[in-house]
């Protein structure tokens, strides 16, 4: 909100990650819900990047039951992103999803979420520590193990990564069609890929957009996304010229 008026905004760290690490020009898609012509929007895009957010996907989208008190919601974003995800995958649009984004990806394809991950037996508290400075909160918090032989393990040439952690919710039932690419020590799914996607279609629970050029794994992920966007851009240009 800007005073009494709703606003549509995106954090600068997401913008600079797309420009500097993916080599693309980002455009903000307003959360207009059913008023947005999803296919018309996707026809003009070379990729779709789903950012994190303080808000959470409303549980009625995945039969999640009663929601926690003081749960931050953004119903217009829910309607917008869930539709965009399904149509982007159907049309072969590259997709990179971060934090709330991977949760949206899982829900869009039929999965469910833990609404309060820290109260699930055996799970760590993955929430942001508000007593720390913003920069400290985005520092590495815990390791994740990459799936052996998986896309990320191959791309990054690594078995484990150390990642930041600023999420209160997490993936519960994995959607059909998603495959796990990384798991935290407590069993929390930290990355997943769309198995039969025609192009780059990956979600991570952490925030690689924070200083992506100083983190090798983040650089490689955004570069791979950017390259997939370039392929689509060339294909769209041929279609327009033809």
Image: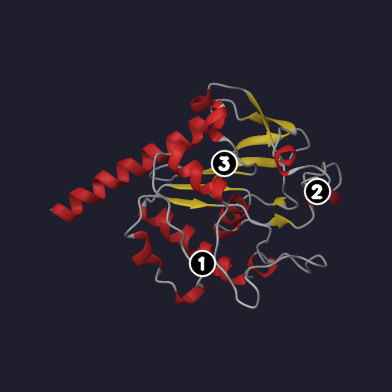
Secondary structure under badge 1? helix
Query: Which badge, 3 or 2, is on the more N-terminal residue?
Result: 2
| Residue on which disc 1 sits | 80
Q: Is residue 71 left or right of residue 100?
A: right
| Residue on which disc 2 sits | 130
Secondary structure under badge 3? loop
Q: CA distance from mark 1 to mark 2?
A: 29 Å
Secondary structure under badge 2? loop
For residue 107, above or below residue 214 = below
Front residue of 106/16: it is 16
Q: Is residue 241 left or right of residue 183?
A: left
Q: CA distance from mark 1 to mark 3?
A: 22 Å
Decide: few, some or many residues near mark 2? Use Cα within 10 Å; few <14, some 14-19, many ≥20.
Answer: few
- Visible residue check, residue 159: yes
| Residue on which disc 3 sits | 209
- Visible residue check, residue 151: no
- Residue sitting at 35 percent across and 50 percent down? 46
Q: Is residue 115 left or right of residue 16?
A: right
- Residue 88: % across, % down: 42, 56
- Residue sitting at 76 percent across and 68 percent down? 65
Q: CA distance from mark 3 to mark 2?
A: 19 Å
């Amino acid at each position: 909100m800007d005073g009494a008026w709703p606003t549509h905004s995106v954090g600068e760290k997401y913008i600079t990650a797309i420009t500097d690490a993916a080599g693309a020009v980002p455009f903000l898609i307003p959360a207009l819900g059913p008023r947005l012509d999803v296919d018309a929007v996707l026809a003009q895009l070379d990729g779709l990047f789903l950012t994190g957010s303080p808000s959470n996907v409303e549980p009625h989208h995945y039969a999640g039951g009663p929601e926690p008190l003081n749960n931050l919601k953004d119903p217009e974003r829910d309607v917008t992103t869930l539709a965009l995800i399904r149509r982007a995958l159907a049309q072969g649009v590259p997709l990179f999803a971060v934090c709330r984004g991977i949760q949206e990806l899982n829900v869009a394809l039929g999965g469910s979420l833990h609404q309060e991950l820290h109260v699930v037996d055996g799970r760590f508290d993955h929430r942001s520590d508000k007593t720390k400075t913003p920069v400290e909160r985005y520092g590495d918090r815990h390791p994740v193990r990459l799936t052996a032989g998986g896309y990320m393990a191959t791309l990054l040439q690594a078995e484990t990564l150390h990642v930041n952690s600023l999420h209160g919710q997490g993936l519960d039932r994995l959607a059909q069609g998603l495959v796990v690419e990384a798991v935290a020590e407590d069993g929390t799914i930290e990355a997943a890929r769309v198995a039969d996607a025609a192009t780059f279609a990956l979600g991570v629970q952490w925030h690689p957009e924070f200083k992506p050029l100083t983190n090798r794994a983040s650089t490689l992920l955004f570069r791979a996304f950017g390259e997939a966007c370039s392929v689509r851009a060339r294909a769209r240009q041929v279609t327009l010229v033809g």
